Amino acid sequence: MEVEAKFSLPDAESLHRFQAATQLAGFPLGKERMEEIRDTYVDTRERKILAGKYACRYRQEADGVRVTLKGIGGASGAIHKRQEMEILLPAIQPAEEWPAGLLRQQVLQITGGDPCLPLFELHQTRVVRPVRWQGQTIARLSLDDVHVMAGGKEQAYYELEVELTSQGNEEQLARIVDCLEKKFKLRPEPLSKFERALALLDLQPEQKLLGDQERVSLTHLAEREDWHGLRSRALLALDRGLTTEETGRQLGRSKRTIRRWRGDFRRAGMGIFPASILENMPALEPLQDNASVASTPAPVITLPDQVGLQPDDPISETMRKIMYFQFQHMLFHEAGTKLGENIEELHDMRVATRRMRAALQIFGDYLDEETWASFEKGLRRTGRVLGAGRDLDVFWEKTQRYLDTLPPERQDELAPLQAVWSTARGQARERLLAYFESKRYRKFKESFSEFLETPSKAASPDLNGSGEIKPRRLRHIAPVILYQRLAAMNAFEEWMSGPDIPLARLHQLRIASKGLRYSLEFLEEVLGAEAKGLIKEMKGLQDHLGDLQDAVVASNLLRDFLTWGTWDHEKTPVANPLPAAPVVAPGVAAYLAARQAELQALPASLPRTWKRIQSPQFKHNFIAALSAL
């Protein structure tokens, strides 16, 4: 009988902290040793071993291959108790050729003699430390850096295990578990590595994900029409036995996103939700019959497409509604951004963040600055991290379009550029993931969520600092905001005629026109039907100016590469003021010429787009849209 305790470690920092420890629950820790472990789990084509509630593992050792047959399950909190049988073979052999014994008999009985095929591979870098007491080793502490490869998918995580030896007892193990839970705040891991790997293949043995109280709480949260409700519906569906693929199909998310949400819940439980939401939930009695949950299908949930503005809303409430709408979109795309499979997830998350910052600028004169200051800092910080990755995505997306126009024999001529771009993209992604896991980001999300879900916290006073009444209704303030943004854009009219418009001026126009476009989009619900056409025209101008700005940035990056051979020379520290050797990259030089050609063509065609914005029809529609207020 194998008896051990298992805990999830949130990050590498926790792993290193335990490596540096000298004792655990009063038991001294001995000298560490490192092991590299390579396991292959096998089963028959019909998964007979799994169906029999067993796992079969081949582990490569110096003396041969150790075959282990383990029972599945048997976990109570952190404590795992499993029946286990082992045999050491000189090499991998069919079960019929194993030495006679109980293990051979058991495997043949389960498989019926069918051959075993690889199911998945599991590699571990393990640091083992003896747990000592009165000169004896009572347990072994294992700190594992785990990498799983299953069905073309990969998973990595950290885990801590405490396995009893024959000289230890369960009372001592209980002391250690209590210390890990209470002092180190670790979350027990109820699943074995085998069971966690099966989740990648959607072959997880049938078991309930949720406890009774968690099921009650999530049933309540699932009524929310926001990101928290979406995640709650996913967890309830998984608990009913749906696969990650089925759950993702019902909720309009990828199965990898659902798998990540399940993993987050297993690590943090209800802690994945803001404390403000959990505190405000009404107390519910435990469900009498879980069938009532199982009989309710998980509805398809989409993000709301309306903010819910009313002309008589106080401007502080207008702002809260707009920010909450965008904040939900930001959170909704976080999982996809972490996964990194679809670059549009990062794009959508960044857009939501930028829109919230734009709203603070647009409505800032009518808000209490101190109330929003700390959240503005959090949004700016988040936007910077997201922007670094998104800018790199945009660069290569447009570079790929250029490559697609080249004949096959020239498809690799930007390989040197792609190599430095890929390095920069990997670094940006590492910073992004580290930020998502940071305490700072978690606190920002929690505090901002609580703030936006409590209308009274966003309310601003009716009087200014001098005691004078100030405008506070949306219908009073919206025309002022929109005319101010229109005037800021129209101020560029005299600069838009004549040749050779400075690129810096066009960049300023892009910023000003974005302010008008965002203002129209924020307030579209309370404006006339003409607003939709105005937004479309503004988007056309924005796209044109955006392509121009992308060409400017790309040309600068390409010139830097041709000079230094690095990505973004200004951010790349160099020991010498001059490059060590000239960069020879004719393909990159040709691409630079193509981007510079864009810099000539785009400004030349801009007056036609600008003319539509300055037309009498645009002005007429603008006035008509405001007349609805």
Image (cartoon, grey):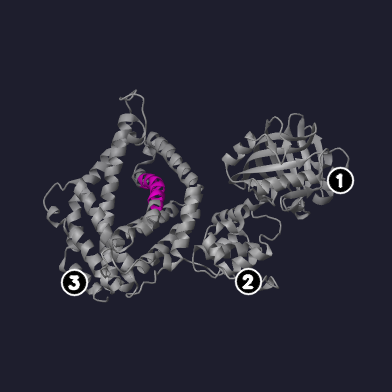
Q: Secondary structure at mark 2?
A: loop
Q: Are marks 1 and 3 in contact (CB under 8 Å)?
A: no
Q: Amino acid at mark 2?
A: Leu
- Viewer-side label of 1, 2: 2
Could you say which is closer to the camera, residue 213 or residue 240? Answer: 213
Q: Nearer the viewer, residue 445 or 618?
A: 445
Q: Which mark is residue 214?
A: none
* Residue 471 among those drawn in magenta: no
In-image side of 69 versus 614 (left or right) = right
Counting other residues with Cα less than 10 Å from the Cα at mark 1, is it few (<14), some (14-19), or many (20 or more)? Answer: some
| Element type where label 3 sits in the image | helix
User: According to the image, label 1 marks what residue?
Assistant: 105
Mark 2, residue position: 284
Dot 1 or dot 2, earlier in sequence:
1
- In three-dimensional space, the C-alpha distance between marks 1 and 2, rounded to whole angstroms, equals 51 Å
Q: Which residue is mark 3?
A: 620
Task: Give the residues in magenta.
Answer: 378-397
Residue 384 within the magenta-colored segment of the rendering: yes
